[in-house]
Image (cartoon, rainbow, N blue to C red):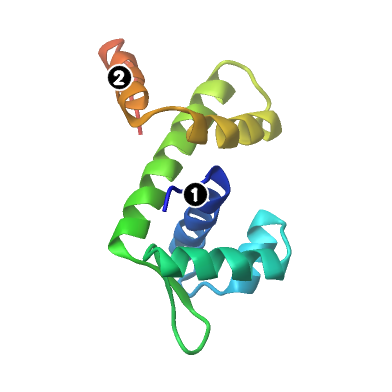
Amino acid sequence: MRLTSSMEDYLEAVYILFQKQGDVRCVDVAEYLEVTKPSVSRAVKELTKAKYLRKDSSGILSLTSSGEQVAAAVYERHCFFMERLIAAGVDSKTAEADACRMEHGISPEAFEKLRRSIERQGEEVK
């Protein structure tokens, strides 16, 4: 299954929410992403089928190892772009929205080269 940017957003949301609060349920993801619960249920079903996500009998969501790899990479790109946009003077709300779009549109190779280029310029990359 090729992950869409929307599916990556769901994985990233589970990743972030787990770090913040531990247990993650569909309702948490719906609130975080400001989407409907049925949308989350459909995404969870697809991501579970593709083995990126697990849902236990009590409704707790967890990332599989492959799901965590994808989510961590998406989140890294998001933070990278958001930090640079804010440093360039973009307001945080716009930077958040733009970083969300940028994190999905860049290839892993281009992102890595961009990150290394900035590191060579002496800027710390988190």
From this view, report whether residue 52 is shown above or below residue 45: above
Secondary structure beneath disc 1?
helix
Q: How many discs mark residues in the rendered view? A: 2
The vertical placement of 75 against 45, above or below, is above
- Give the alpha-carbon distance from disc 1 to disc 2, as whole Å: 21 Å
Residue 84 rendering spot, x and y as whole percentages: 50, 22
Q: Residue 8 carries which label?
A: 1
Measured from the top left, where is residue 82 in percent x and y? Answer: 53, 31
- As drawn, the residue found furthest toward the front would be 1
Graded by Cα atoms within 10 Å as few (under 14), some (14 to 19) or many (20 or more), the crowding at tag 1 reads many
The answer to whether the residues at label 1 and label 2 have Cβ atoms under 8 Å apart is: no
Q: Nearer the viewer, mark 1 or mark 2?
A: 1
What residue is at 29 percent from the left and 61 percent from the top? 65
Amino acid type, residue under disc 2 in the picture: Lys
Q: Quadrant of the C terminus?
A: top left
**SS class of the residue under badge 2?**
helix
What residue do we see at 54% from left, 56% from top?
A: 10
N-terminal of the pair, mark 1 or mark 2, is: 1
In this figure, which residue is indicated by the disc labeled 2?
113
User: What mark, if any, has residue 95 been given in the picture?
Assistant: none
Left or right: 44 in relation to 93: left
| Quadrant housing residue 111 | top left
- Say which residue appears at 37% left-offset and 43% top-offset: 73
Task: Give the amino acid at mark 1.
Answer: Glu
Say whether residue 101 is left or right of residue 91: left
Q: Is residue 84 left or right of residue 113?
A: right
Residue 11 rendering spot, x and y as whole percentages? 48, 56
Q: Is residue 80 above or below residue 32?
A: above
Q: Where is residue 91 in the image (x, y as percent from the top left)?
A: 68, 26
